């Protein structure tokens, strides 16, 4: 993967290029941020640039044998570590074919996307002590091409304690010409001692214009739709792709949100139950997008209340409803709203009963709106 294939993150790209040009590459670097911001693609592009035989001014050449090997995720000096279901494989090597196919399909993916890829029973993948032993073996070997050996560890926060302690020792005394690129969605869940050994690279939300340009090219959609998806996705490419690929349109999402909030505010239990039945009949992908949309609309209400209308990013139809609805969203209930809908999204990923889940959300919303 080349830097030009990574959407946004221009400041971090410049920083990484400067490291290589100045020959001051930190041996351990942590890319921190939501998977939709592009930490894994950026780490891959950085690794390819370091290993490239014919580096260009601002990118790898993409044509040399080394670049082709990295693109195919087959370079002998590029290693991967990621969470696995222990009953399937205790180490990453056992799932490398799945890993390669996932990245080659779309390199922006979440922990739950990975679970669905590797385990139909949807267990809980971790990086275990067996993996740390395998990493130690790999990094003791000499580089095949005489340059850097690079390890990309995806979601290091899934390491168990025994594994984390062994990885810490490797970070404290790294083999020569070895780079550790950790890609984390929640760096706070890591040991402080591991974080302190890494140079932190904080991923940013993808800029509005960059996102719009990408969506036009990727999906061949009109300007108005691009703007709507960009606003909704809030700088998250994974979310933007989910929305663009969904058959739900903005009107349907808006109507579902309005119906839910109105019935909850009126404490009309029959309407709330009917709404829950209707939402439960939709596919999981649509349900997830609705939850994301609701979180977006709630945030826009807070923005309107505390920062002014000019910073609100919604359609004209949505703005008309927010004008009336925003007074009911405040510092008194926004945290509870966000927590409830975040938890619902998590439970939906874990195959919760959608009828029960959306019924509970209606009753929670009723309570929050009257707080």
Image (spheres, rainbow, N blue to C red):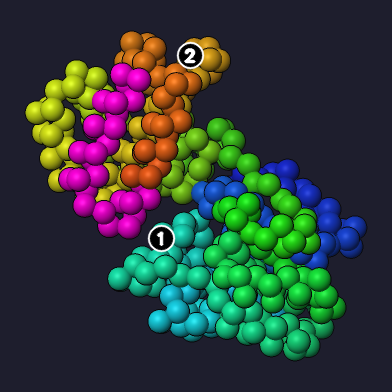
Asked if 67 appears above or below 16 in the picture, the reply is below
Foreground mark, 2 or 1?
2
| Label 1: element kind | helix
**Which span is picked out in magenta?**
345-371
Residue corresponding to mark 1: 113
Residue 137: x and y, percent? 69, 88
Residue 221 shown left or right of residue 12 in the figure:
left
Residue at (68%, 47%) from the top-left corner? 202
Which labelled disc corresponds to residue 305?
2
For label 2, count other residues whose C-alpha is less than 10 Å away and answer few (under 14), some (14-19) or many (20+): some
Picture quarter containing residue 17? Answer: bottom right
The answer to whether residue 347 is magenta is yes
Residue at (60%, 49%) from the top-left corner? 33
Q: Nearer the viewer, residue 111 or 12?
A: 111
- CA separation in Å, label 2 and label 1: 35 Å
Q: Is residue 145 visible?
A: yes
Q: Main secondary structure of the magenta part?
A: helix
Residue at (51%, 60%) from the top-left corner? 107
Q: Is residue 39 visible?
A: no
Asked if 176 appears above or below 303 in the picture, the reply is below
Q: Nearer the viewer, residue 143 or 161?
A: 161
């Amino acid at each position: 993967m080349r830097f030009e294939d990574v959407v946004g993150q221009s400041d971090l790209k410049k920083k990484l290029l400067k490291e290589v040009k100045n020959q001051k590459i930190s041996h351990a670097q942590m890319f921190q941020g939501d998977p939709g911001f592009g930490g894994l693609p950026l780490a891959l592009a950085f690794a390819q640039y370091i290993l490239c035989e014919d580096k260009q001014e601002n990118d790898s050449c993409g044509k040399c044998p080394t670049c082709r090997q990295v693109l195919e995720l087959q370079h002998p000096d590029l290693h991967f570590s990621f969470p696995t279901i222990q009953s399937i494989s205790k180490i990453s090597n056992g799932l490398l074919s799945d890993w390669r196919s996932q990245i080659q399909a779309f390199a922006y993916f979440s922990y739950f996307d990975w679970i669905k890829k590797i385990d139909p029973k949807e267990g809980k993948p971790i990086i275990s002590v067996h993996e740390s032993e395998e990493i130690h073996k790999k990094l003791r070997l000499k580089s095949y091409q005489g340059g850097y050996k690079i390890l990309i560890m995806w979601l290091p926060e899934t390491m168990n304690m025994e594994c984390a302690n062994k990885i810490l020792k490797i970070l404290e005394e790294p083999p020569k010409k070895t780079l550790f690129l950790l890609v984390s969605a929640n760096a706070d869940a890591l040991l402080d001692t591991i974080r302190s050994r890494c140079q932190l690279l904080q991923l940013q939300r993808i800029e509005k214009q960059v996102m719009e340009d990408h969506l036009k090219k990727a999906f061949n959609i009109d300007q108005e739709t691009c703007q709507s998806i960009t606003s909704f996705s809030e700088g998250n490419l994974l979310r933007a792709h989910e929305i663009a690929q969904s058959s739900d349109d903005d009107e349907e999402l808006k109507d579902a949100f309005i119906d839910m909030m109105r019935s909850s505010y009126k404490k009309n239990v029959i309407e709330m139950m009917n709404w829950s039945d209707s939402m439960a009949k939709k596919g999981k992908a649509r349900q997830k997008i609705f939850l994301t949309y609701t979180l977006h609309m709630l945030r826009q209400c807070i923005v309107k209340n505390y920062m002014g209308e000019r910073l609100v990013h919604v359609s004209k139809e949505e703005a008309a409803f927010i004008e009336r609805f925003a007074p009911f969203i405040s510092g008194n209930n926004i945290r509870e709203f966000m927590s409830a809908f975040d938890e619902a999204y998590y439970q939906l990923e874990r195959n919760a009963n959608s009828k029960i889940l959306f019924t509970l959300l209606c009753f929670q919303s009723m309570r929050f709106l009257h707080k």
